[in-house]
Amino acid sequence: MLRLEMRPDNMPARRRRKTTRRRAKPMVKVLPALEAYMVANVATQNLMGGTPFEVILGDLNTTAGSGPLGQLMGPQPGVLTLKELVTGEYNYLQLPGPAGSMSPTAGSQAYVPMSSSVRTSTGSALDIISQNFQNNVGNIIVGTALTTAGFRIANKVLRKPKTKFNKMLRDVGLGTTVQL
């Protein structure tokens, strides 16, 4: 039996307590983070000549460190690093022969032996980035478009396996922290 409550016309409507909004816990989504890194990699390879790790961590010490990532801590000839962007001084390769020296990103695709002489010079890092942008704008557009399209296709194709993997993460107890 349905019960209707009658109110007089002059009585105000009941005020309901406002429920507090609960904030969702921060979650790390792996595939969007990987896509962001890949797009950043396209940009830094074409503009600064190295991976995002080389651009951020490179040239923090005057000599290369030891260990598997030790090369990232020393001078990065051929890579324009964050420190070099801030200071305005950059390392470049001194090549033997009539060529003289190279732009910081000109030799990024080639293997640079550690015996290469590294010279420090003052100059505008923004000029180097703008020149690299003019030279590589096509690579940046195509690389970014293909990376984004590839991740969109992968998300569609891997929808069922991703769902199963995320369910497994929830069962283990990591579902509120990490998601594929």
Image: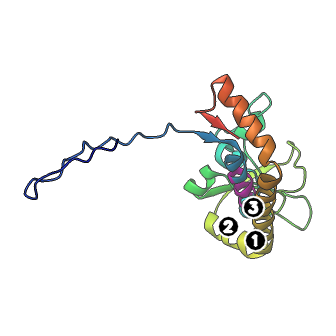
Q: How far is mark 2 from mark 1, CA to CA?
A: 16 Å
Residue 118 - label: none
Q: How far is mark 2 from mark 3, CA to CA?
A: 23 Å
Q: Earlier in the sequence, mark 2 or mark 1?
A: 2
Placement of the C terminus among the 4 image quadrants: top right
Task: Tell which of 100 and 56 is nearer to you.
Answer: 56
Q: Which residues are magenta?
A: 36-44
Q: Residues within 10 Å of mark 1 (few under 14, many from 20)?
A: few
Mark in front: 2 vs 3: 3
Place of residue 126 in the rendered image (x, y in percent of width and height, measured from the top left): 62, 67
Q: Is residue 96 left or right of residue 127?
A: right
Residue 163's place in the image compared with 6, above or below, is above
Task: Tell which of 87 and 30 is nearer to you.
Answer: 30
Place of residue 150 in the rendered image (x, y in percent of width and height, measured from the top left): 81, 59
Kind of residue indicated by mark 3: Thr
Task: Tell me the residue that label 1 is attached to.
Answer: 141
Q: Residues within 10 Å of mark 2 (few under 14, many from 20)?
A: many
Q: How far is mark 1 from mark 3, CA to CA?
A: 11 Å
| Dominant SS in magenta | helix
Place of residue 71 in the rendered image (x, y in percent of width and height, measured from the top left): 77, 38
